[in-house]
Image (cartoon, rainbow, N blue to C red):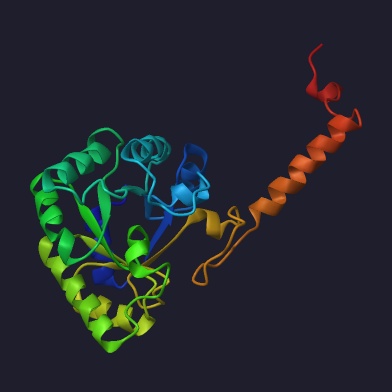
Amino acid sequence: MFTIQDFIKKKKDGDKITMLTAYDYPFARIVDQAGIDAILVGDSLGMVVQGLDNTLPVTMDEMIYHTKMVSRAVTDAMVMGDMPFMSYQASISEAVKNAGRFIKEAGAAGVKLEGGAEIAPQIKAMLKSDIPVMAHIGLTPQSIHRMGGYKVQGKSEEAAKRLLEEAHIVEDAGAFSLLLEAIPMNVAKQITKELSIPTIGIGAGPYCDGQILVLHDVIGLFERFVPKFAKQYANLNKEALNAIQSYKKEVDDGKFPSKDHSFK
């Protein structure tokens, strides 16, 4: 089983960390069998599974439900639970309680929180309860209304400096790793160089200690759009459509079920 100590060791040894999202048992098994180091049960499920326009409506109960399924499927990868909007912002005690649900109920080994300095108290409190935390800065999807949409962050010198400050703050608070989303690659390179904890990039260039993508982008199962930073390695949407159309045609033509698919 991949652990937090393995995260740290890979950074120290210069080995890349691989992460993907997953949201259910069948795909989690495939991701685990592929040898991916860690699985994030992301609140991105709101968009790629539930068909929502953003991640904000996703609830804690929904996150626990999906994380349980992923945890049942996995034998080697580390499972992380993504804390949804308003599950950790209102109070520190509520944040710890909700984070604890991922560990106690859903079988996760840690949680991810969006934010920098403002979540440092939550990170510290969670660590006191033995809940490992991955922090997340740059483009934070739960802040789309404040940010004015899904925009690259840290492009100006001042904004890049602030990201670097935020990175050090969450590291000092005790985060074991840091996800960097949609920031210039040279900014990510500087953050990765200065931190002792691993950085995981998504749209942050090649210099991070590891990479993560949304599973549905990788396998071509989300047809609404593909982010610039994502690479599609397959087109399962097309394959599934072809298979289902073939099934329909065989039923319409009386070819399925045949004797081979029937009982005597």
Which of the two residues, 215 or 37, is positioned nearer the viewer here? 215
Who's the residue at 41% across and 52% down the image? 55
Q: Residue furthest right?
A: 253
Residue 140 seen: no
Residue 80 locus on image (x, y percent): 31, 49
Who's the residue at 21% across and 49% down the image? 88
Left or right: 94, with 188 as reference point: left
Left or right: 221, with 163 as reference point: right
Residue 231 locus on image (x, y percent): 55, 67
Who's the residue at 73% across and 47% down the image? 241
Q: How many marks?
A: 0
Screen quadrant of the C terminus: top right
Residue 103 locus on image (x, y percent): 24, 39
Q: Residue furthest left?
A: 128
- Is the residue 51 above or below the residue 72 in the image? below
Residue 207 locus on image (x, y percent): 36, 78
Left or right: 221, with 40 as reference point: right
The picture quadrant where one finds residue 195 is bottom left
Which of the two residues, 53 or 195, is positioned nearer the viewer here? 53
The picture quadrant where one finds residue 102 is top left
The picture quadrant where one finds residue 97 is top left
- Is the residue 12 above or below the residue 135 in the image? below
Left or right: 208, with 203 as reference point: left
Which of the two residues, 30 or 136, is positioned nearer the viewer here? 136
Q: Residue furthest bottom?
A: 157
Who's the residue at 37% across and 55% down the image? 37
Residue 25 seen: yes
